[in-house]
Structure formats: C-alpha cells, structure tokens
Image (cartoon, rainbow, N blue to C red):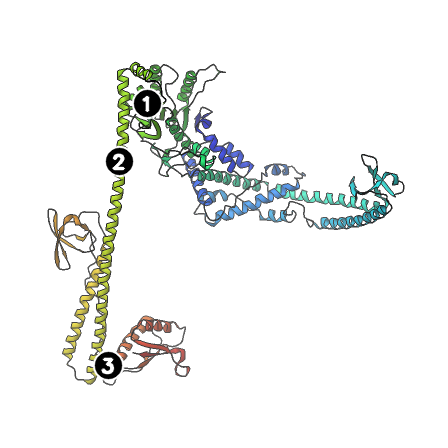
Amino acid sequence: MILYPNSLLEKLGFEHVRETTLRATQSVQSHERILELLPLSFPNRVRQLLNQTQEMITLLSGSDSFALNDFPDIRPHIQQSRVEGTLIPLYAFSEVLKVCAMSRLVKQQLKKDPELHPQLFAISEAIVPLKELESYIKGKITETGELRDDASPELKSIRKRLNSRKNELRSTVNRLMRQATKDGMIGDEGATIRNGRMVIPVLAEYKRQFHGFIHDVSSTGQTVYMEPAESLHLNNEIRQLQAEEQIEIERILRELTNHIRQNAEFLLQNSDSLTELDVIAAKAKVSVQLNAEIPIISEDGRLKLKKAFNPNLMLKNLELPVAQRAEIVPLFLEMLPNERCLMITGPNAGGKSVAMKTVGLCALMMQAGYAIPADPTSEIPIFPGLFVDLGDDQSIENDLSTFSSRLQWMRESAEASREGSLVLIDEAAAGTDPEEGGALFQAFIEWLIDRECTVMVTTHHGSLKVFAHDHPYAVNGSMEFDQVSLSPTYRFKKGIPGSSYAFEIAQRMNIPDEILNRSRTLLGESKRNMESLISELEVKSQQAEELRTQYNDLVSKTKAERNRYQNKLASIDREKEKIREKALKEAKSIMDSANQKVERAVQRIVEQQKADKAQIKEIRSEIEEDRGHIDEAIEQIEERKEAVERVSSEPPQIGDFVRFKNGHTSGELVERKGNNAVVQADGLRLKTKYRNLVKVERPKQHQQKKARSSVLIGESTLNSGGISPTLDIRGQRADAALKNVTQYLDTAIFSGLASVEIIHGKGSGILKDQVHSYLHERTDIKKFELANEDVGGAGCTIVTLN
C-alpha cells in the first residue's frame, strides 16, 4: 500500500494503535514485527489477516485460555550453536525448553477443533513437536535452570565425592575453630572462603602459633586468614574434584549444544510460528479492547461506516480514569460507488477533521488486519494507496511556506496515486487567495475523480460546495450544528452543505454587535443570503430528523402492539383447537369403550346362539360410522394445524386452498366479488373480506379412509367350545407375535377368562420385552408376571385380565 507523506501513520493515529499493540505482545520477535507492521493492499492477504484476527478473537473469548504466553527469544542461542564446538550458556537450554513446550501445547490446542479456526490451525501445522529434545533437556536441566546432579553418571559420582569432602572439610574446620576459639586465637568472625579455599580468621599476634598457611590479611592488618595445615589435603582434593566437575559440565553442555544444533531449523520454525500467532493475538486483544468488529470488504467501491468510533480517540479515552472519560459521538457515513468525492463543510471544531481521520484510520487498520470499532455491516474497500494532506507541513529547512508544502504534497500525490486510492484533504484552499486556492483544489479534485480515486475534503470555501453540488460524482456533507445552543453536535449529515457559523459563534463569544453588524454588511448580500439559506436548511433538516425519529418510534411501537395482539389471537385459536381436539379424542375414547362393551355383548350372544347375524352386523356398522365421523374431525384439525406452516406469498385465486388470517379455519376459495369472498369450509359457505385470506398449500387428500380398528368376531374366531387359556408365540417375529397377542387378549377378555398364559420362550429375552412393553400400554390388563419355574419360568408370562 502506497502511503504519503511519511508522517501519515502518525497524523491519522495509527502509531498510537501500534503502541497499544506492542504492549499486548509477549516476545521480542513479536515486538519487532509489530514495529514493521504496515497496511497491505493485496485483497486475498487482507482477507486472510482479517480471518486470522476474527478466529483469534473467538479463541481468546472462549472458556479455555490460549496456551500461548510469554516466550523467550532463542534466535541468538540458535545462531551461537551453529558454530561447531561452541557452548551456549546453561540458561539458554531452559529458554529453548520453554519454546519447545509452548510450541507443543499450542499445536495440541489448535488441533482440537481445526474447523473452528482453520487459519490459526494452518499456522500451527508448521510447528514440529520436538518431544525427544524436550525429554533430553529435561534429563539434564532442573526446573530452575540448573544442571541436574544426575545429568550423567560421571557428574553424579563427582558431585557425590565433592559433597562428601566438603562435609569432611567443614567438620575439620569447625573442630579447629572451636579449639582456636578456646585458645583465644580468633575473634567473633567465623570461617570463610579465600581463593576458593576454606580458611580461619586468626588474630595477627597468633599467626605463628597456628599451624597453617596465610591466604589473606584484613584491611586493618589485625586478622590473617589461614588455611589449617590439617585441612590442606581436603582443600586440595576439593579443588581437584571441582576441576573435574567443570570438565564434565562442559562436556554435557557441549552435548546439549549439539542437540540444539541438530534441531536448529525446527526450533527457528517453531519460534517463527509462535511469533506469528502472538502478533495475531496482539491485534485481536487491541480489537477486543476497542470492542471492534471485522468490517465487510467492499467489492464495488462503496464506503460505509456505520456507528464507527475514532480508534485513536477511544484508546486515549480508555487510558483515562472512568470519571474523566468523554463521550465519543459515532460516525455514520456512506459514499456510494458512483460518489467519488465527499465535500465536508461546517463550523470550526465541529468534527470535520475527526470524521475524515476516522475514515482513514479505519481503512489503515482493516488493511493491517485489525477489527475496527464499528458495526460489522460497515463496508470499506481495499485502497491501493492513501494520500493525506493534514495539518501544517511548513518546512524551515526547505524554505517552504504552508501553501508551498501543500503544493509539493499535491504534486507528489498526483504522481504516485493510482486508481482506487483514498485521498484525504483537510481545509482545502486554505493558506492562499480564496478564489485562486479554490480553483486550484477544484481542478486537483476533478483530476483525482477522473482517475477513479476516492476523495474526502474538508473546507469552508463556498465555491467547493457549489462544485460538489454540481458535479455528478461528488456529494456534499456537513457536520451538524445546534443553532439553539450554538454548539456542534459532531454528527455527520450527507447531502447538505454546512455553514461555518462564524457570526453565530462570534455572537456566542460576546463580540460587540457593532462589529458583527459591520461584518455582515461587508460580507455582501448574496453571500449573506446563501449562508442564511444553509442555516435555514439545516434547521429544517434537524426538524425533519426529529420528525423521522418520532415516526420510527411510533411505527416500532405500532408493530410491537400489532405483534402482541396477533400473538394473543394465535394463542386463543390454538387454545380453542386444543380444547376441541381434546373433546373429540375423549369422544373417540368413549366410543371405543362403548364398542368394547357391545363386542362383549355380541360375544355372549354368539355363544348362546340366539343372535340374528344381520342384526349384529347392523349394530357394528352404526358404531363404525360414528367412530369414522370422529376420526375425520380429528384429521381435519391436524390438517388445519399443518396448513398454518404452508402459507404462500401469492394472492389467492378461485379454486385455491386458503386460510383466514385471524385463525386456523381453512377451505377452498369458491367465489370473489370485489373486496368480498366466499370460502367453502367443512360443508359451510363462509363470507369474508378478500384481504382476510392467505393462500396455503392444499392438505393431502386421503383417497381412502384409514381402516378402522375393530375386532372381528364370528365363527372363524370363536366357536361354542370356547378359547384356549394358553397362547404360544415362540419363534415368531415381534410384529406378527404382537398382532396375535392383541387378537388373543381381545378374544379372551370378550370370552370372560380371568387369566391366560403367553409362552414366548427364554432365548435372548427380546420377544419377552416386546410383549411386556405392549402389556404395560393396555388398560384392560390387571397385572402380569413371569410364571413359576415349575410351569415355564422366564419363558412364560401369566396375564391377569380385568
């Protein structure tokens, strides 16, 4: 991305964002990368950066903390290890071990749910777990970074002997100290070390009486530090063992260094992956701090910031105590694809520059992979370049005035800008003759528009307002000014030019009326009329905005109230259907119960051979007909309930199946006369208003009625000899067995049996479980239990009938 001038990042506030990001990093490498961070203009790479940030925001906000934390810079140690025969310091291995462990943990965490964060998972794929190196270092180094005593058998042996000799030396020296103290040869000072050997502080006058060797003398000359002759051989042996220990330590460190050298590339690769993840995490943390969202990348050049806050102002606000934080007004700004220039006018200190900086900084942040503090529906194009003319760039060294420096910026920007670049110009035409300056900047803006750049300009010049009004690819905008309080509201309004309100602000500042009146006279009638028109237009615009807000509130309340009543009506309709459905089901239950009683009566008649078969057939037919009516009513209820979910957006026509909007009644539209309609429903012709109907999908038509469940009783199922008290269903499939059980139990009950036996066999118990589940569901079964072992046991169930 081309950026001009060099001070652009500082002027727009990106450096402040960078500083905040630096504080969120956890390594030296990450710090270095953030310092080099610049916005990019490659669309695919920008999308990738934004996806990475979004995934990291989600990861950091999860219940599990991210495994990545502070990690050391191991690059110097790796570089040092590359030289054959060199040793890296002992502490370096602890740092390498930390990087190894963190790399492994981060890779494990991102591998758990790779589909939730594919971009981060892809980065972690480059991490190579170095478990063998981890284990090797852990076998040599303690958790505190010291060399383990058992790092090698030789070191363990040397240190064991060394500790033994040191203990022996301490015992010898303590014994000699006690004797010398008793003899009055030493003062209050205890044994100490001189030149690596344990010595005793002896008073100078006794140095010839104490058997030993002088190693040092106190500054006063009153004390000499003597090594007892008796401990000489122990000190010598300790020095020898210490030399051997150092040789073994160097050998172990050399082996450790060799292992680091062998894994150098993998270690650097892992460190690089951790650094990349840490940079993403730092940007995500700043995004979370700003309560930011990932915007939409605009494909057609549309620029839309919805509820956008200036990131720089937000960060400065967050650094203050809560009581001192100011309210920041969000920006709502949109430039359509055919609007290449936005001319922002309005009073001084009204927020024009802040609005422009907000656009520029949000664009920089997005193209650097940050979320922005704006609504996620905001849209920003990817700009190949950003050119900013902001503030006073007067240069004493180059002998350039303010206006000259602006002309230099204009020349450089014209040469470097390319199609689609974003150009921000603050206070255009300031610093020179208004008419000449206005003409010059108008020509420059036209030049940029012709090259399809996106241009934002702040100005007070009326000629540029007129230009924006007349040009087909330019549009005016202004920062709102409250004419009642004579103060800016910092709210942006598109389509209306703003006034500078110089006289109104001067009046608020108590400038004498005589001066104000004279200034108005000098301004001229036409200029005064235009400013007055703009002021009047803004007042009317504010009034219209208030009316629009009131209207939206009323619409919102009306919709809420309508929804409440519709929900209430729907609830009442559902309750009505539930009551009707319950009543019909109860009626069906009564009919079923009556049918059972009739069947029992018929059974008894058959047994007594006194019945007229034609009469029996007639009774059964009547019962089936009544039950059919109830079943049909229940089916109609179910169909109407389904029809509620099958509403069509098309207006209903004659012959369509329709439903009343205020209920669940449905039927066929058979007639329409103007605003009136007739619906055929359940055999009735219902008149209603056409607008009360909605087209719904026609319910499935049953070509034939469902077979009514009944128990057929006749000579084929019963005979005068009665029914067997036992039913054997062994070897039958579950569905066939349950069908036989059903018929058998119905016949047994009609026959008046008190109990029966069902033989299902033992086997795997599946058939038994199916039968028992079925028996649980029947209400005409008093109880059932497995038979005793002597009469079948688990293979037979005894059923007691009501």
Q: Which residue is mark 1?
A: 504
Q: Residues within 10 Å of mark 2 (few under 14, many from 20)?
A: few
Q: SS for tag 3?
A: loop
Residue identifier under label 2: 548
- The residue tagged 3 is 718
143 to 410, vertically: above or below: below
Q: Are marks 3 and 2 in contact (CB under 8 Å)?
A: no
CA gap, disc 1 to disc 3? Answer: 109 Å
Q: Is residue 27 left or right of residue 768?
A: right
Instruction: Determine the residue positioned at 14% across, 78% down.
Output: 615
Q: Is residue 40 visible?
A: no
Three-letter residue code for mark 2: Arg
3D distance between C-alphas at marks 2 and 1? 27 Å
The answer to whether mark 2 and mark 1 are in CB contact below 8 A is: no
- Residue drawn where x is 66% and y is 47% of the image: 140
Quadrant of the snapshot with the N terminus = top left
Q: Secondary structure at mark 1?
A: helix
Q: Amino acid at mark 1?
A: Glu
Q: Report the side of 509 relative to 568 (left or right).
A: right
Q: Earlier in the sequence, mark 2 or mark 1?
A: 1
Which one is nearer the viewer's eye here, 20 or 768? 20
